[in-house]
Image (tube, rainbow, N blue to C red):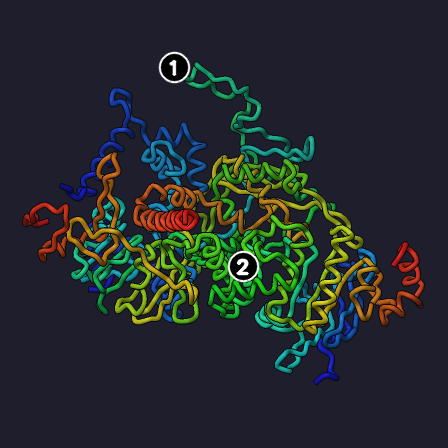
Amino acid sequence: MIDMPLLSVEGLSKSFGRQVACRDISFELWPGEVLGIVGESGSGKSTLLNCIAGRIAVDGGKILYRTAAGDIVDLATALESRKRHLMRTEWGFVQQHARDGLRMNFSAGANIGERLMALGRKHYGSLRDTALEWMAAVEMPGERIDDLPRSFSGGMQQRLQIARNLVTRPRIVLMDEPTGGLDVSVQARLLDLIRRLVQDYNVAAIVVTHDLGVARLLAHRLMVMRHGEVVETGLTDQLLDDPQHAYTQLLVSSVLSV
Amino acid sequence: MYVAVKGGEAAIENAHKLLAEDRRGDPDVPELTVAQIREQLSLAVDRVMTEGSVYDPDLAALALKQARGDQVEAIFLLRAYRTTLPRFAVSKPIDTARMQVSRRISSCFKDMPGGQLLGPTFDYTHRLLDFSLLAKGEAPQAEGNGGSVADALPQVVDLLNAEGLIEQEKPDPDDAPVGDLTREPLLLPAGRDVRLQNLTRADEGYLLALGYSTQRGYARSHPFVGEIRSGEVSVEIDVPELGFSVDIGDITVTECQMVNQFRGSKTEPPKFTRGYGLSFGYAERKAMAMALVDRALRAEELGEDVTAPAQDQEFVLYHADNVEASGFVQHLKLPHHVDFQSELTLVRTMRAEIAAEREEALREAAQ
Amino acid sequence: MTIQQSYAATATVAGYNFAFLDEQTKRMIRRAILKAVAIPGYQVPFGSREMPLPYGWGTGGMQVTAAVIGKNDVLKVIDQGADDTTNAVSIRRFFTRMTGVATTEKTREATLIQTRHRVPEMPLTENQILVYQVPIPEPLRWLEPRESETRKMHALSEYGVMHVKLYEDISRHGHISTAYDYPVMVNGRYLMRCSPIPKFDTPKLHMNAALQLFGAGREKRIYAVPPYTEVKPLDFEDHPFQIERWPETCALCNAEDSFLDEVILDDRGGRMFVCSDTDYCSERQAAGHRGRMAAPYKEEAAQ
């Protein structure tokens, strides 16, 4: 059903002691849509992402996901086994630091093939071919298939992370500052790649970033967060060109060029 | 012609005989008695009892004699013996507040009710080898009130408690089950009862190193010695048929309460936190190290980030038992030639393949 | 006579119960064994006791043996395939002292076999129990050091990472480079370690007529493969599991189908290969088979 959202978050709340990280957050995500969550550090955006991914237990609210089979799962209360399975198949998570999202002691090919092996693929030759295909898709040189991630540049490690996640054709990919820590030219090329892949494979994505330039390039819609709350949402260009909320105006104006 | 080497039985018999000879040493030197070890090497006895989990100075002394002074080996002997002992009761918790104290100190206060009682300690000795002990001379008797005993000394932590300055230890209800590592395997996450049991049986050197690491910055907890007290406590068991509890004997224990890094938040006023150590006899270094590690292992409970080895429950608790550690480390001496043979075969095969590939490449290049 | 009394009558060392452990402890171990048999390949935690041999030297296997051994059993103990290696001798002596039970070096005569690192070459029968000594029971241990995580992985059948390791071996060495203690899938459900038996022995676990029990004393786990259970080594379709091969046959009995130990003869690289399973080798020699190094056969003096 195309007219039903892929993900529907309702009233999500999370606090750490007296510190409110997310207050009553609600939004929807549609197939093939890229949603950007922007804000300064401490705004709660990374916490929100980790709650959605099921890594942190929420204090309240629902995270309703429509699976490929068509049923609705509330990830806030689902069994851990269900969540873990979804995170390896229909979902992906690209971490800010590659070491958190890759097996650093295993080769590029092994990293890409892991999800497939977990699903029962048992032909070494074809696993290797699939890995090469994906390396090409993320513009990594195929002859590095047996190299370890620590021998790659930061940009290539991120490409590897992306390939590792996309190999099961996930329907949603979460990204936490995917280009953070990379230098500007590398960032630009990586963003181009992400934009193309998201389009080619019709992946919905939630991208958390403090960088409005990244948001502008990748996201169709934006949510601005401050102190655990969403202060403004809207289509990316509209929001960035004509911010309504005072805080958004502050954010936009403090960036030299977007 | 090849003759299979047999005779493992005979080899073992001979090894036992040699061991017995070496254990005895020079026959012209008088044989050590168990009583001598018990009396004159009492700190070794204390360690063996603590880590062997059996309070019996004579058995611990016997184990030390049989083990030729190797404490880890003696601990093993005692543990193996313990396996055969039937359990007929579980005692009530010992009450260290009612201890007959022979040593009691605190570094938090210059003085407190009951005073600082040094007792028999190495602390203020100068570590100079005393050659008068080489001769058969008697050590001088303590003058004054050496060996005095005080009882019903208030716990220093209770003094801090009265002001609400230190976190309360909330005891579990009397009928709550207590974990028992001598009966059940360690499963994580482990409750504090199981952790403390694991630590008290743990290798002293291991705990010492871990405790030391916390003082050097691997998860600092700003420790102070709230109190160390050593002395006798009575062990009581409930006898249902009698309807009251019975004192079955006294044991000597050393207890260390550490006062650590205070914690507070916007609503909770800050309080000191605690670490606890307990050992048999006068094993004071052990009790102190244990208290440091206990506090470190409470990191998650106290909302601290787990960053250092001493805070890592799995790492600390799984490697603390020296009977397990010694066994596994030393098992490497056992024959492994079958597995090694498998590895040899594999490596030779891989090398042969590479050599064949190289030859093939050379041949092709030559054409 | 009660069971206690009859055991006391057989025990040969005063003051110790039959087979060393008290009856409560044996019962606890048997319950763990039953659970293990009901869930093939699953590691059951149990309250392992300190034994008079060190942890790491077979205490797990010994506790399993002590829990199942009876007066009428005939016990065989081997290490590296041989009955007279020092540790096998030590363990056999322990049980002789603690049970008075008959022992044997002949596989076909034994009802209970405790083994370290080998499976006997002769096929076993439904009347036999094979007890393996296990140092590290957890197949995922080198990939994931945390016990809390590996228990979850087993519960959720998350075994992908094991295949990742095998993939990596092939990409680096051209082969799966696990030579012993090979990971296997038991009954299509649980990933299991066979204990450090060589790859060569792994196929023997599959559909074995005997009950196979695995004891890890230090790690405090028991697991089992019931008779006639499927045990499949992990591999890839295009890199199938393969056992070791030798360039020669056994120098004493000429066997082509047994695991061979390498013996260095001199310092000029002279070597020979002999059966690791000493009983198998001597049976073959008794039946007339000769290898290139065998002396003319003499009747061995009765043991």
What x and y, as percent, mark residue B297? 59, 48
What's the residue at 27%, 33% (across, down)? B19
Give the vertical position of B14 relative to C130 (above or below): above
Label 2 chain ID: A
In this rendering, does residue B233 appear at all?
yes
What x and y, as percent, mark residue A250? 92, 59
Crowd rating for badge 1 (residues with CA inside 10 Å; few <14, some 14–19, many 20+): few
Give the vertical position of B215 relative to B248 (above or below): above
For residue B279, side relative to residue C48 (left or right): right
Q: How many marks?
A: 2
The foreground one among C202 and B356 is B356
The foreground one among C267 and B250 is C267
**Residue behind mark 2:** A110
Label 1 chain ID: B
For residue B19, side relative to residue A141 (left or right): left
What amino acid type is highlighted by mark number 1? Ala
The image quarter containing residue B326 is top left
Callout 1: SS: loop
Q: Which mark, by number, is residue B135?
A: 1
What's the residue at 39%, 40% (across, down)? B75
What amino acid type is highlighted by mark number 2? Ala
Callout 2: SS: helix
